[in-house]
Amino acid sequence: MLFLTLAVEQIVNGLFLGAIYLLIALGLSLIFSLGGIVNLAHGAFYAIGAYLTIVVSPYLGFGGSLVVAPVLVGLLGLLAEKFLFRRFYRSDPILSLLLTFGLAMVAEQAIRMIFGAPPLPYSIPQALRGQIFLGDFVLSRYRLTILAAVVVAVAAVWFLLQRTTFGRIVRAGVQNPDMVAALGISLKPYMAAVVMLSVGLAALAGVMLAPISGVHPAMGAEVLTGAFVVVVIGGLGSFWGVVVAALIVGVVRGLMVLVYPGFAEAAIYALMAVILLVRPRGLFGERILRFE
Amino acid sequence: MTQDTHPTRRRLVQGGLAVGAALAMPAIGRAQGGATGAPIRIGHLTPRTGFLGPLGEYAVAAAQLATEEINAAGGINGRKVELLTEDSVNPQTASSKAERYIERDKVSAIVGEISSASALAIGQVATRGKTVFLNTGANSDALRGQDCKRFMFHVEGANSMYVKAVGRSLVEKGLVKGKRWYSLTADYAFGHDLLKVAKGFMQGQGGTFAADELVPTDATDFSAYLIKIRQAKPDVVISNLAGNQITNFLKQYAEYGLPFPVAGFGFDTALAWGAGAGNFAGTWPCLWHHKVDTPSAKAFVAAFTKKLGKPPENQAWGDYNAVRIVAQAMAETKSTEGPALVSYLEGGAKFDVLKPRQGYFRPRDHQLISEMYAITALPADQVKDKWDLFTSTPALPGPNEDMEVLAPTAEEAGCRMEG
């Protein structure tokens, strides 16, 4: 019984972690699906989001940071797209890999030079502190609030991609960019918007984790691998694939900490390997001609 | 040409501590121009990225400060000191960079490191190259025991010193005998060694472990562990974590509001500062902190704060002292040769290490014997500024005790010097 309680508790808790992975992985998946760029700098945008929280919240509070930081990082993404990413959509993926790898290093080092290497303190806002007890369960009030916010953000992204003209063109661009071009639609502005949206989501995750995780220059690298695993498990081109994969990864990690903590991080990679063996395109991956 | 001898460009390329580097440059510029002899090179090597990176910044700044002070006072036997700095990254990189320091840059000493695994790698290279290496941040007892090296000296304390120092506080608070501990341990050389030492201590004192869990060094979320801890209801939660892990752990421990007292066996003040008032909790050991009240400590704190705009923490203490110890050894022996320096350091020389009593290296295992402190977090409402988050015990061992009571015994860490 105790084990069952613990297991349920870990599952609920794992959902939060999964939700944070989701915000980062959604953007990674979008940028790769549409632009063919594996964005190794995605973690850097997440880190910048966390640092902007520290800069912005003395003036606008945590709530203000939730809005302002993603917008500012989105603008940064716009610059990155216009001056860097744009040149690499049609080239060998290895080039964009090198580009974004370098960009990640530059960003991390820039943070180190501006803010210093030691972690900066930042706490949960007073109103969101405390725990909620449900019988034997303990839930962090902060995490529950954030989980709700993630659900809203992800629902908004879903609506944007599935129910608007913008989303239809983006999805068509993922499937067949040449056909989209033949129809007289330029993907350029859409790509810029997708990059803005994607890095903005990563920054949102950074704001959300700043109160409960160390804010330090290398924090982006810490989340990036997990997010990539989510993208690979979920499969390219599928919105729900990424959602399901993120939640699975969060929950599996939580349960592994319960039964065999030494294997908790490795379990995620083992899971990825198994899923790739069974479904090489990931759980819900679509067949995208140019990636085959 | 990843590392030419023109420090300005190399440092800019390396990035990292921009302020510290910028301030250090004039001193090094002079060192190359106006000195009578060729400058004495000291190679500094420590992690500046990754989960130990936050501490590396303090290490580099402090080593540079010590170098500037030495050069301002006329250098060593009329020769200026030139400090080279590198990011050690991981054991493989640390090893090859140490080799490059010795073979190509002809350094007279290597100073630095925080990771126990990397320190071992550097120690091996240094001993092969007959160049002294002062370890300033790696704690594992094994480095002083089975892995000890003729040319490796430890300014940093051994794990068993940390455990015994904070263990005393815990015994006084009645948190040891008959109590159940739940420990979280960093899953690499340092953590494994620390856990072993902690278990030995607990066994000797009549306590038990409710559980001991290994946490990967890249883990950032502790909530799953905290839920387990809450159900296990231990008497004390013990952190054998390292680097950024400690900040994450402290913030999330506060988030979940667990009622159990916290103590840690490995610690750096920067990580408490990174967690902030209200999140920092528990009792922790350190070799030194910025509130130690001796004249030389105050001078160091003032100089460091003036240069960096923030007080030094314990890692800064290690690298600052290590550079000064090397300089003293070279000045006294009038030599930069490894074997001569080893004889001097082994010979019982005393060093002002910014604490009430002077320190010295124990010949048996090359451990710097000096005092320690146990610090306890202040409640958030008693914190006056963001640096003064804790109260401290007086220096341990006390003024009438033998200096070596905290150091590893021959049984805990037996050493047969190689090389």
Image (tube, coloured by chain):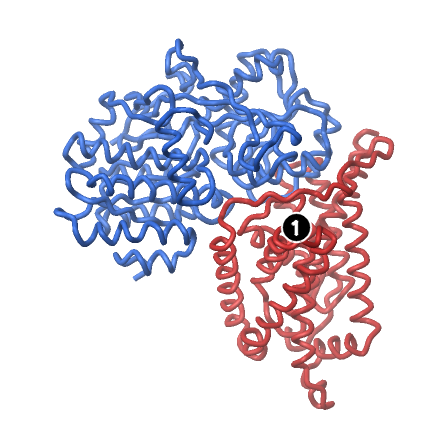
Chain colours: A red, B blue
- A260 over A68 or under it: above or below: above
Residue extending furthest right? A135
Give the percent coordinates (x, y) of residue A268.
Answer: 65, 49
Give the percent coordinates (x, y) of residue A280.
Answer: 67, 63
- Residue holding disc 1: A58
Q: Which residue is drawn at 81% across and 52% down?
A: A148
Residue extending furthest top? B400
Give the percent coordinates (x, y) of residue A48.
Answer: 59, 57
Q: Residue at x 70, y 39 (%)?
A: B223
- A30 over B394 or under it: above or below: below
Q: Callout 1 environment at 10 Å: few (<14), some (14 to 19), or many (20+)?
A: few
- Horizontal placement of B131 versus A146: left or right? left
Q: In the picture, residue A224 is in which quadrant?
A: bottom right
Q: Residue at x 82, y 62 (%)?
A: A155
**Residue B147 in sight in this render:** no
- B321 over A118 or under it: above or below: above
Viewer-proximal residue, A82 or B375? B375
Element type at mark 1? helix
Instruction: Report the amino acid beneath label 1.
Output: Pro
Give the number of callouts: 1
Viewer-proximal residue, A131 or B206? A131
Chain under numbered label 1:
A
Give the percent coordinates (x, y) of residue A237.
Answer: 72, 69
Residue extending furthest left? B36
**Residue A234 in sight in this render:** yes
- Horizontal placement of B209 versus B107: left or right? right
Q: Which residue is drawn at 65% across and 23% down?
A: B261
State which quarter of the image contains the C terminus of chain B.
top left
State which quarter of the image contains the N terminus of chain B.
bottom left
- Horizontal placement of A27 versus B100: left or right? right
Q: In the picture, residue B405 is in which quadrant?
A: top left
